[in-house]
Image: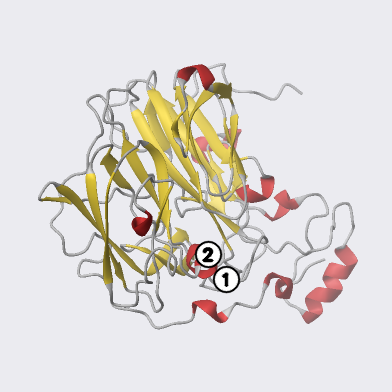
Amino acid sequence: MSTRRSFFHKVGGLLAGAWMARAATAGSNGPVESTPPPAGNAGHAAVVTPDGRTLPYRLKDGVKEFHLVAEEVDHEFAPGLRGRCWGYNGSTPGPTIEAVEGDRVRILVTNHLPEYTSIHWHGVLLPNGMDGVGGLTQPHIRPGETYAYEFTLRQHGTCMYHPHADEMVQLAAGMMGMFIIHPKAAAPAVDRDFAILLHAWAMHPGTSRPDPAVMTDFDLWTYNGKVFPATAPLVVRTGERVRVRIGNLSMHDHPIHLHGFLFEVTGTGAGPIPAAARWPDVTVNVPVGATRDIEFLADAPGDWPLHCHKSHHTMNQMAHDIPNPLGVDQSGVEDRVRKILPGYMAMGETGMAEHSAHLNMAAGGSGEHAQHMHGGMQGPPNTIPMMMGAGPFGPIEMGGMFTVVKVRDGIASYEDPGWYRHPDGTVARRIA
């Protein structure tokens, strides 16, 4: 059995601090004049960061100059759950940096946090003094200071950025981003190129700040800072070749599984894998601190899940220390406890689905006419259910690292097309 009290944990005070002034233009790259980012080579699409954006730059004396502002951000994981996180340019993760092999880049980093920071360019080949390890390769960036990192890009592939200063707090609070380096020479093209950064959070029910003291017992698992059903779909036209770049700066490995397609693992943090060494799969494990690129031909229309295959990574906020009530008749105990704790609900005798959101189907059971009903246990403020999402046929009952690859015939844009309309006779049906 479980009471609401079991959902609360002590919140570490390590993130306490005053709200600092935002950049001159909050949520952008600050005061620099920006130009569009590169699309890589001819025939290569610019990277799409679902629920995110690419960081603009300005060309200054032949150098591509970017500006990152480290600051506290008011972040929405999903409707009903907001956090006071730390990030860059008004978001967590920060904006994706895109450049081209051979570019000279200058990245200005302004610190609006209440403590010092630095930035490490994870996987990028550069001079030692630009590596961004506070105290080892550079002084720390103090509050209010701006530092310049400048180097020439000598590689291409999927990299990342994050602090190397008070990492336990700053990574736990959301300070990270993707760094994509396009090849200078011609390379096989893809039509759609996505970037997804994985992270784990301890956002205890009823609280609003990530807890950096948690090492493994996390309760939120995000794609680009969002949990399902708030994760943006990956929209693709039938017949397109798709690349998904996946980076992991969480504290867990994540086996990312794609339904409906066989993909090839085409890249790691060290860059593209030679064609003869690539391997086909349907699940790719992304270790901590690593990136993996996968590519596939989107030749099957439909709504295809892309999710972590660790089951508790596709759930949202929940305590992990409740007793196992499966198969236990708690009706008598529930009545007695409710006299002391109004609203108490016994959990899980027949499984946890009884506490998820429910769908009340209209006459005929058509998903198109489903009405969402908020069922299950009422949680504390600023808390979302562990299983969410209403699909065309009923509850999807997922959270966390889950999204949908939406493949459609002949679409004119990449806006969300809604749920897939299955051709007659192609949906599993009840026969008994």
Which image quadrant: the N terminus? bottom right
Q: Position of residue 258 (x, y in %)?
A: 55, 31
Residue at the farthest bottom position: 18
Q: What residue is disc 2 on?
A: 172
Near-viewer residue (319 or 392): 319
Along the viewing direction, whichever of 249 and 45 lies nearer the viewer: 249
Q: Which mark is residue 339?
A: none
Placement of the C terminus among the 4 image quadrants: top right
**How far across and down, in percent of the image, does residue 352 sit?**
74, 52
Q: Quadrant of residue 98?
A: top left
How packed mark 1 is, by other alpha carbons closer than 10 Å (few <14, some 14-19, many 20 or more), is many
Tag 1 and tag 2, C-beta contact below 8 Å: yes
Task: Determine the residue positioned at 46% across, 66% down.
Answer: 82
The residue identified by callout 1 is: 211
Q: Position of residue 306 (x, y in %)?
A: 53, 36
Q: Examine the rendering and report whether any part of residue 47 can be seen.
A: no
**Number of on-image labels:** 2
Callout 2: helix, strand or loop? helix
